[in-house]
Image: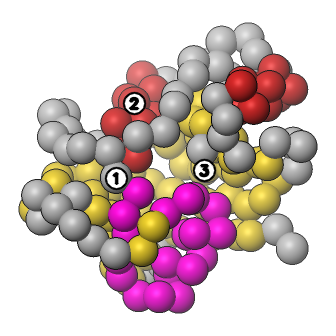
Amino acid sequence: MLLTTSRKPSQRTRSFCQRLKKAMGCPYINRGKMNIQEILQKTIEHKESTLAIVSEKHGNPSKVTFYNTRGEEIGYMTISVAIPKNLKTRPTKKIKGPIENIRLLKGLIPFEEGAGWDFWLVKPAHGKYNMIMELYHEKKPTGFKIFIKRIHLED
């Protein structure tokens, strides 16, 4: 998965992308003035199969839209985030939690089921969020959380 932002991102959105890059071990590119076709070309050059574009609302990350290398939207997540200042972790794509939630997320993000010392824990949520993804480092929470309001997969 190649990660980038929408045009003219806020500092908070750039920080979120940098932390997500570090946490997942995926490449991140600064968008600059690149259009979608140029970004898709970078996705292919990085040998990635998915492009994730982080959009914002009022300066905060609010949506991640996923595309395949043909430029077709494969789905999106509407989100809110908690970003720790000092993130201590190693890159991981390990995930654990309720199977129905993991299945939805794996439709968008190349996660591997199971857990080790570092992993993402998916928990059901209440209220305006459907689930919460929290990053763990050495089996301890890091404070890096993605609150997921909605996941939509294209048919």
**Mark 3 secondary-structure assignment:** strand
* Type of the residue with mark 1: Thr
Quadrant for the C terminus, please: bottom right
* Type of the residue with mark 3: Lys
Query: Residue at the spot x=52%, y=28% of the render?
Result: 28
**Mark 2 secondary-structure assignment:** helix
Q: Position of residue 52 (x, y in %)?
A: 64, 43
Instruction: Name the mark on residue 63.
Output: 3
* Type of the residue with mark 2: Gln
Q: Residue 89 sits in which quadrant?
A: top left
**Label 2 crowding class (10 Å Cα cut-off): few <14, some 14-19, many 20+?**
some
Extent of the magenta region: 93-111
Q: Earlier in the sequence, mark 3 or mark 1?
A: 3
**Mark 1 secondary-structure assignment:** loop
Q: Do residues under tags 2 and 1 come within 8 Å of each other at their CB atoms? A: no
**Label 1 crowding class (10 Å Cα cut-off): few <14, some 14-19, many 20+?**
many
Cα distance between the residues tagged 2 and 1: 14 Å
Query: Residue at the spot x=64%, y=61% of the render?
Result: 108
| Outermost residue toward the top in this view | 33
Question: Up-down: is 124 above or below 42?
Answer: below
Q: Name the residue under label 1.
A: 92
Cα distance between the residues tagged 2 and 3: 16 Å
Q: Which of marks 2 and 1 is nearer the N terminus?
A: 2
Q: Do residues under tags 3 and 1 come within 8 Å of each other at their CB atoms? A: no
**Does residue 97 show up magenta in the picture?**
yes
**Does residue 148 show up magenta in the picture?**
no
Q: Name the residue under label 2.
A: 18
